[in-house]
Image: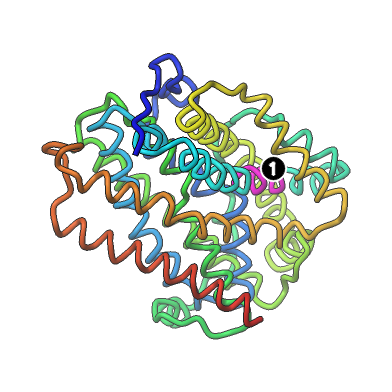
Amino acid sequence: MTTISTPPDLRVPKSRSVGFKHCGPAFVAAIAYVDPGNVVTNMTAGARYGTMLLWVVLLATLIAGPVQYLAAKLGASTGRSLPQLIADRCSTPWRLAYWTQAEIVSMATDLAEVVGAAIALHLLFEVPLAAAGVIAAGAGAVLLALGDHWGLIVVPPSPVELAAGLAPSLSGNGALVLAAGIVGATIMPHAVHVHTDLARGHSHLASHRRDVATAMLVAGTTNAMMLVLGASALRGSVGEDFSGIASAVAERIGPAAQTAFLVALLVSGVTSTAVGTQSGAVVMNGLLLRPVPASARRLVTVLPVVILLALGISPVMMLIVSQVVLAVGLPMVLIPMLAFTSSRRLMGVGVNPRAVTAGMSLATAGVVLLDLALLADALVG
């Protein structure tokens, strides 16, 4: 393999580039865990299958915690982001190939953020979808708002149904796709890239453990609540149309809840845009070995989204598919990160214990099997 050194001036600034310098790295990365893709995938899963896929949310969150800690440990111990480490160890063709798939995953992330915010603008202010996509793409990061508690208060879920949702099951047409979407929306490749970059220079692993544990508790609870909201308030009422979700919220919970849902969707979209933009910068700077203006990259992302919205493609389906793309791209993040953090030569005293390597190997194998099952299901279907 060819070793390529990344000049220091091409490395992405850590906290400054994201604008969340007072938050821990895990909290910045966790903003991506409550983006519009998560909202729609979890609520659609609940609306279609009740709490049947709740176990997927919980299992994916339990895996996401160690994944984010390994990402923090990798950046803290090596002073390098994951893309930079991959670039150092790959020849130019492999480096560009890895960049291509990473860029596709990043674009799927951007699509979810832009589409979610655009739909919220469309339903709240009757802005045409294509124009709303342009506005959403240009919006800056704002405070994250979570309005999904309404439905849980007004329509409390059944304890029996909640307990039943903890038993693994994927019965039902389309359940496998939504399960993959939930995994992709929870263990997000771009959040790993950002976390490895943000953790550079922060060598206190104990603080990273606390940071990750707290952030994952908040993000995991929120994702579970979104699924439960769909199961308790929207069961059987949601098709492939976003206005159907909003209408069902208004009909079954109330107009105030509908407004809260749309505002939360809008704010989550523009907030997670900051993490998506940072991820694209980390990937490009680390693998292309040259800085790329954020405005140029956003333009490349916005054009296909605006075209798809103008063509009338189902926004709900676009969001779910974008999360499935994240799940398909996960092995390309998990495998090299596990290999790097298991290398004593690279990590020194921060090397993974054998039990961690074994556990994360099983988790990575599970993600690969899920992707293969999804591929087989698509081919058969």
- Residue, far bottom: 171
Q: Is residue 289 magenta?
A: no
Say if the magenta span includes residue 116: yes
Q: Is residue 198 above or below residue 250?
A: above
The residue carrying mark 1 is 114
Residue positioned 29% across, 66% down in the render: 362
Tag 1 secondary structure: helix
> Taking 154 as reference, is 337 left or right?
left
As shown in the figure, which amino acid type bears the numbered disc 1?
Val
At 34% from the left and 31% from the top, the residue drawn is 3
- State the residue lying farthest toward the top: 9
Give the residue drawn at x 25%, y 31%. 78
Taking the image as drawn, is residue 25 in sight? no
Main secondary structure found in the magenta portion: helix
The quarter of the picture where the C terminus appears is: bottom right
Asked whether residue 49 is in view, the answer is: yes
Q: Is residue 163 left or right of residue 299?
A: left
**Residue 263, position as x, y percentages in the image:** 68, 44
- Kindly identify the residue that appears in the image at 52 percent across and 39 percent down: 96
Magenta highlight range: 109-117
Q: Residues within 10 Å of mark 1 (few under 14, many from 20)?
A: many
Percent x, y of residue 177: 58, 71
